[in-house]
Image (spheres, helix red, strand yellow):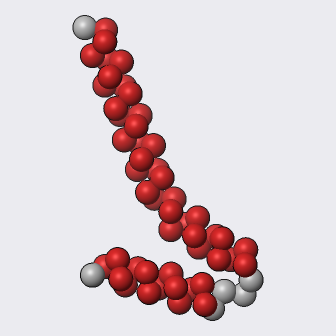
Amino acid sequence: MSTTILQDSIEEKIQNAPDSSYEIGIFIGSMLPFVVLIVIAYLIYSYNKNRNKEK
């Protein structure tokens, strides 16, 4: 349910965007949290993998 609300607000922002660079900013801003989570998960994975090799 929250994703549809989030999607609706993003679509509304894009429709009311003054130019195309604003649309790019909205897209990057909506994808950034997922990218950060993926990077953190990979860093934790690689840290634990290297730590287990040392034992």
- The mark tally for this picture is 0
Residue 49 placement, left or right of 24: left
Residue 54 falls in image quadrant: top left
Residue at horizontal 57 percent and vertical 70 percent from the top: 27
Up-down relation of residue 41 to residue 35 (above or below): above
Residue at horizontal 50 percent and vertical 81 percent from the top: 10
Expressed as whole percent of the image width and height from the top left, the position of residue 33 reads: 45, 59
Up-down relation of residue 32 to residue 1 (above or below): above
Expressed as whole percent of the image width and height from the top left, the position of residue 29 reads: 55, 66
Expressed as whole percent of the image width and height from the top left, the position of residue 20 reads: 72, 78
Residue 26 falls in image quadrant: bottom right
Quadrant where the C terminus sits is: top left
Residue 2 placement, left or right of 18: left
Residue 15 placement, left or right of 40: right
Looking at the image, the residue that sits furthest to the top is 55
Residue 48 falls in image quadrant: top left
Residue at horizontal 44 percent and vertical 87 percent from the top: 8
Up-down relation of residue 43 to residue 33 (above or below): above
Residue at horizontal 63 percent and vertical 91 percent from the top: 16
Residue 49 placement, left or right of 27: left
Quadrant where the N terminus sits is: bottom left
Expressed as whole percent of the image width and height from the top left, the position of residue 53 reads: 31, 12
